[in-house]
Amino acid sequence: MYNQFKSVSLSHRNAPLVIREKLALNEAEAKGIMLRLKDFFDVTDVLAVSTCNRTEIYYSSQSDLNEEIIKLLLIEKGISDIAPYTTFFERFSDGESAVQHLFEVATGLQSQVVGDMQIPNQIKHAYQWSADLNMAGPFLHRLLHTIFFANKRVAQETFFRDGAASVSYAAVELLEGLMPNPRVLVVGLGEIGKDVCRNLHQKGGIEIILMNRTKSIADELGAELGLRVADFSDIETEISNADIIVSSIKRDEPFFTKEMMVRLRGMSFKYFIDLSVPRSVSPEVEEIPGVMLYTIDSIRSKADEALNRRLGAVPHVRDIIEEAVIEFNDWSREMVVSPTIQKLKGALEQIRKEELTRFTKNLSDSELEKVERITSSMMQKILKLPVLQLKAACKRGEAETLIDVLNDLFNLDKEKANH
């Protein structure tokens, strides 16, 4: 099973945002693609992972279906001209590389913002979808729980989850500390503006209003997150009603000026968070009583400090992953010999029962109970050494030879057929 595990990956490492957006999967789409895979191919242990930075499909199959799965994903997303998109995908065609990749993704080593705190929850959601569809077998169950335990160690033993290491997440962290349950106006929905909205939306308890010069962009994000969209022409009204204004407008000179604030007389207390380069909020707005401004420099400085702490923890995180992968590999190899162990147990149990039937007809119930205990104990002791030797052979990579020997010695294939 281990060597049958494979995956395809589209991520920020190889694909620009415009491509990633086209191939992102919501819950219904992720479940749909998993059901398609089940219908079309002989696959098990299917996991569909989709975040704002990656879309990945993991599966177990005797055949390498990576190219077919990429084509199926593109077709399901309504893309008929497949060839230009296939180069954006990474392929993992052996169990070792696919397992290692999933560990690194799930712990945040592969995230655009290293140590991303959202990724463990996103992997858990994907796992739940797989379990809901009965597409997670023993291999995937064990793999994901090993990953979750490794993630727990990462959180407890390292600084890898400390602080907000991206500008957008640092902005959200700042915003949360300004006031409880604020009304937030987000103006400008480029990549950083969208990230802020998505991060804010996950927090809950915050009213978010979207605004963008090209309204269709705001409408699309609003539909995705269930947020209100305001017309750009109503910006002064929306500023008056908002508690916090997050600006990531792209322009050569400030859009929010002191003059604009003067026009909005009678304003309540306002916070501006300027994420634009060049600045979109004039420093002079702070001359207006009740207006406070936070710039990208202070936010980026905070994010850089957190990022440096996380980067310093990377070697420890890799050590934790290596230990977890070794543990999982040992278990996976033992899975190879598990059928042989079960057949051997079955063969010996059959012999034990047959002999008991022959020689215990005249025994009392108490005598029969003693014989049952004695023979069962003998069988367990006889089994102990072959089982230990099989598991040790797994770690040495010599299990197949020992499996063949046991099959020949005990005629296990014939025994299985008889059962």
Image (cartoon, grey):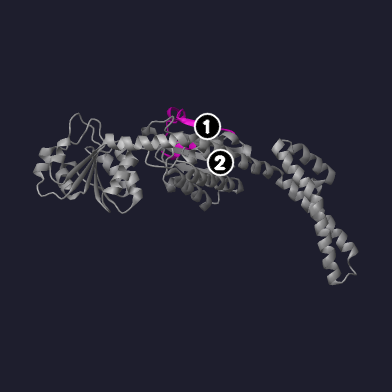
How many circles with numbers are drawn on the protein? Answer: 2
Residue 418 lies left or right of residue 68; in this view the side is right
Q: The N terminus is located in which quarter?
A: top right
Q: Is residue 296 magenta?
A: no
**Residue 362 appears at what percent x and percent y?**
90, 70
Mark 2 element type = strand
Q: The C terminus is located in which quarter?
A: bottom right
The image quadrant of residue 219 is: top left
| Residue at the spot 31% in from the left edge and 35% down from the top edge | 300
Q: CA distance from mark 2 to mark 1?
A: 12 Å
Mark 1 element type = strand
Q: Nearer the viewer, residue 212 or 392?
A: 392
Q: Nearer the viewer, residue 42 or 94?
A: 94
Q: Earlier in the sequence, mark 2 or mark 1?
A: 2
**Residue 340 appears at what percent x and percent y?**
75, 46
Residue type of the residue flagged with mark 2: Tyr
The image quadrant of residue 59 is: top right
**Which span is picked out in magenta?**
71-94
**Residue 386 appears at what percent x and percent y?**
79, 46
Up-down: is 361 above or below 190?
Answer: below
Residue type of the residue flagged with mark 1: Arg
Q: Which residue is mark 2?
A: 59
**Residue 65 appears at what percent x and percent y?**
56, 35
Q: Is residue 81 magenta?
A: yes
Q: Which residue is mark 1?
A: 91
Residue 73 visible somewhere in the drawing: yes
| Residue at the spot 49% in from the left edge and 46% down from the top edge | 156
Residue 163 lies left or right of residue 273; in this view the side is right
